[in-house]
Image (cartoon, helix red, strand yellow):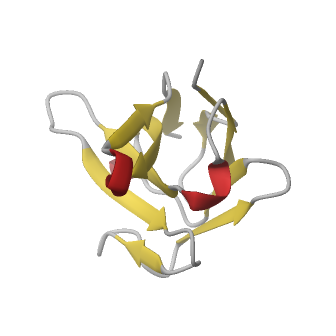
Amino acid sequence: QVQLVESGGGLVQPGGSLRLSCAASGINFSIYTMGWYRQAPGKQRELVARITSGGSLGYADSVKGRFTISRDNAKNTVYLQMNSLNPEDTAVYYCNAEFSVFRSNYWGQGTQVTVSS
């Protein structure tokens, strides 16, 4: 059974930081591309950041220079360090695991991030 469990969300003031974690089980984690997506109320889910099995990185323009994605294959965990948060970053953040060769795609349950004073 595949599980992706996010943690680290919460309420933070503008300019603050949060670190999200996503622990994976039931998959060969090291071969998967891992991503963080977010969905704000009334908006479509959007890609925030992704990291391939080889370590290649990709970011949405809106978070470049502020967010950093990383992975620890020994811990089957992917992280999202979020700095300089602003209210526009408020959303539910979802972890995603994708392995296109097997057409495998899995989602976590999401963690709420709220940026407000």
Q: Nearer the viewer, residue 109 or 92?
A: 109
Residue appearing at x 46%, y 50% in the figure? 36
Q: Is residue 96 above or below residue 112?
A: below
Is 16 displayed left or right of 111 in the figure? right
Q: Residue at x 31, y 55 (%)?
A: 47
* Any part of residue 109 in sight: yes
**Residue 90 sits in quarter:** top left
Q: Say left or right for 112 vs 30.
A: left
The image shows residue 5, relative to residue 36, as above or below, that is above
Tell me which corner region of the image, top left, top right, bottom left or bottom right, holds residue 83.
bottom right
Q: Who is closer to the viewer here, 4 or 15?
A: 4
Q: Residue furthest top?
A: 1
The quadrant of the rendering that contains the N terminus is top right
User: Could you say where residue 12 lies in the image, as x and y percent from the top left?
Assistant: 62, 42
Q: Position of residue 33 (x, y in %)?
A: 48, 59
The location of residue 9, given as percent across then percent down, is 62, 34
Whether residue 87 is visible: no
Where 82 sits versus 108, above or below? below
> Could you tell me residue 60's position as x and y percent?
32, 69
Q: In the rendered picture of this protein, how many numbered marks are placed on residues?
A: 0
Q: Residue at x 33, y 51 (%)?
A: 88
Residue farthest toward the front in the current orientation of the protein: 102
Q: Residue at 57% across / 25% down in the picture?
A: 2
